Image (cartoon, helix red, strand yellow):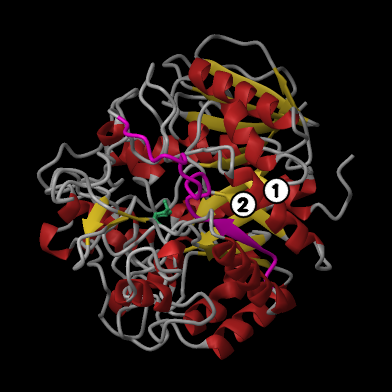
Amino acid sequence: MPSPTDWWRSAVIYQIYPRSFADSNGDGMGDLPGITARLAGLRDLGVDAVWLSPFYPSPQHDAGYDVADYRSVDPRFGDLGDADKMIAEAKALGLRVIVDLVPNHTSDEHAWFRAALQAAPGSPERERYVFRDGRGDDGGEPPNGWRSVFGGPAWQRVADGQWYLHLFDVSQPDLNWGNPEVRAEFEDILRFWLDRGVDGFRVDVAHGLIKEATLSDYEYAGEILGGMAPEGAPPPPMWDQDGVHEVYREWRAVLDAYEGDRILVAEAWVQPADRLARYVRPDEMHQAFNFEYLDTPWIAERLRKVIDSTTAANAAVGAPTTWVLSNHDVVRHATRLGYPVGERRRPGIGAGDPQPDAPLGLRRARAASLQMLGLPGSAYLYQGEELGLPEHTTMPDDYRQDPAWERSGHAERGRDGCRVPIPWEADAPSYGFGPTDASWLPQPSSWAEYALDRQRDVPGSTYELYRSALRLRREHRLGDGSLEWVETAPDVLAFRNGGVLVVTNFGESPAGLPAGAEVLLTSEPLTDDGRVPQDVTVWARG
Ligand code: GLC
């Protein structure tokens, strides 16, 4: 039985992307003091915890997911004292804090990698990474044909002729998790942040740490984005190897030695659901993002299937499901849902691409969020979604910073569009992101209408919809609840979670509610005769 201290089983966790949340010093880059000053607002919104994307020293070739020092703070974001203040303020407000841990790779500016480049082939310094001799007569061919997730080959040659593996950018060399020194170092890094009072870690690329021992070639390598093999292809040798679970069992023991209820969250692009559920077995991690739900098209039957299969796979190992619709790696759901139903998720959108139907996207996004927050389990929100914020879909390409843009030879616009600094005040410079006009990515001129101060206390605004949903979710204990489907028309998805009925209508004909149902919340107004219009979710009692 879950103990009452298992806060994470039902928690709503808000992702802060530090670069783009709040800038206290006006340099155009968000920072830790900016976050600390705005935590009370998140408490007011009603979330239980925050997860911060990396704020560690980094050359920022992959927006901080290229870490040069795991035990410090990048001066762009502040210093360790600012991190301590942020953690203390969160605690005072009753918010938990989760930080990002990037164990698959370091930055090429990490002291270990610099040492590896100075050292000889076969040296202990090189053994911390994945260095190999090349193929071909002069070793001029990469050791195998693996491709980087961001495009191009996954190997880079160094001055003495050896090659190193980088599943992501060339500035992100993969660590060798077969090396006990690497394991010991990361256990120490965990303790460093646990000692500072964090409540857990979101583990970046959790499915990638261990590679198949012989680094066997893989003909589908170029087709894999983040670990999903194409249908019918054999399992990829770089993702979801059984050895990763040993690492997480060790980490779990580290966390369990601390008081409080500290957690590990897997970012693992792994399917099917029962493979993903292996990451949340009782002696491993606590949660894994349900990306299959995020990727499911806006079709009642498909959503029902994925809600069932992922809930069942998690239940089989005693874990809750962890719902998510947006994050810093995917097109925001208010935009994604504005494209024709069933289209493949786009890896970024630019001015030359087909543009979404923005009002439709927002309408569906509000319905999707209300559906998600009605489900039992934990839910992750991405900063700005509570404002109904869309992707920046017309950003001039000159501004793009995601390494995927260059590495894909401009085939993929990349993730900058979901990372734009968020609007707080409609009439302030940088919409209140900071005290000046500076913003590391340009904000669209149409964003005043999304600003928090235009939505707070405005009935029907997306912000108030989220705030009401989070309050009711807590009051009715929906996160700890259980799901029971209610059979209705095929275009309608309806379930009961305890005393609350959640109905989403995907079809053109308005859907009726049971006689006497008391409406608690709706993502859009009902029809005059009290029925649920298309692309609307309702919470009701009775
Ligand atoms: C994860 C992060 C992503 C990053 C990648 C490499 O997928 O979420 O932003 O680029 O790992 O660290």
Q: Amino acid at mark 1?
A: His
Kindly indicate whether the residue at mark 2 contacts the one at mark 1 (C-beta within 8 angstroms): yes
Q: Which residue is mark 2?
A: 265
Q: Is residue 424 visible?
A: no
Side of 451 relative to 446 (left or right)? right
Q: Residues within 10 Å of mark 2 (few under 14, many from 20)?
A: many
At 27% from the left and 28% from the top, the residue drawn is 219
Q: Position of residue 174 (x, y in %)?
A: 40, 57
Q: Position of residue 316 (x, y in %)?
A: 74, 27
Q: Main secondary structure of the magenta part?
A: loop
Q: Amino acid at mark 2?
A: Val
Would you say residue 200 sits in the magenta stretch? yes
Quarter occupied by the C terminus: top right
Side of 511 relative to 280 (left or right)? left
Is 151 above or below relative to 277? below
Count of all numbered marks drawn on residues in the image: 2
Q: Position of residue 419 (x, y in %)?
A: 34, 60
Marks 1 and 2, the one that precedes in the sequence: 2
Task: Indicate which quadrant contains ligand 1.
Answer: bottom left
Q: Which residue is mark 1?
A: 286
At 65% from the left and 66% from the top, the residue drawn is 187
Quarter occupied by the N terminus: top right
Q: Nearest the camera: 361 or 143?
A: 143
Q: Nearest the camera: 43 or 106?
A: 106
Q: CA distance from mark 1 to mark 2?
A: 6 Å
Q: Residues within 10 Å of mark 1 (few under 14, many from 20)?
A: many
Is 469 above or below relative to 292? below
At 46% from the left and 21% from the top, the residue drawn is 506
